Image (spheres, grey):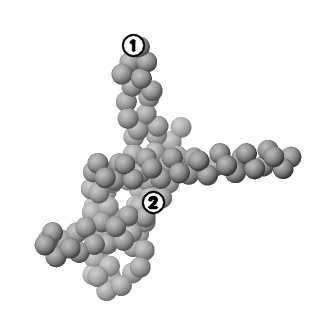
Amino acid sequence: MTTKHKLVATIPHGPKDLGAEIECAIAFSFLPGGKPSSDDPGWGPEIEFISAAPIRPFLEYEAMQQESLDELAAEWLASDEGQAAAVEEVAAELQEARVFIAEIRRES
């Protein structure tokens, strides 16, 4: 089952020697991968970019068109760092849901 999530990321942009970064919220969809078995090696999760939005808008963001921000965020999400961050975010949300359900069960 595909689920939708958001994570906050600080993405580098522009020339590397300048150290420019953009902090944004990235929305993505997540489909868990298949677990390995004796017949199948399994596969990793499918993570697809949906959209990006700046966290703290200021002049630099206003100068950057949404299309450029989306492209930058999609590239970052497709990177090893982005994929790991997405998996970590989904795992954290899943753990929060488990704790919430356990609390509800204790109360009933």
Q: Secondary structure at mark 1?
A: loop
Q: Is residue 15 left or right of residue 34?
A: left
Tag on residue 63?
A: none
Q: Where does label 2 land, which residue?
A: 7
Q: Where does label 1 land, which residue?
A: 39
CA separation in Å, label 2 and label 1: 35 Å
- Name the image quarter holding residue 74: bottom left
**Kind of residue sitting beneath label 2:** Leu
Residue 97 point in image, percent of width and height: 64, 49
Q: Residue furthest bottom?
A: 59
Question: Is residue 105 visible from the viewing direction of this image?
Answer: yes
18 shown above or below 42: below
Question: Is residue 29 visible from the viewing direction of this image?
Answer: no
Residue in the picture at 38% in, 64% down? 9
Residue in the picture at 18% in, 71% down? 14
Q: Is residue 20 left or right of residue 42?
A: left
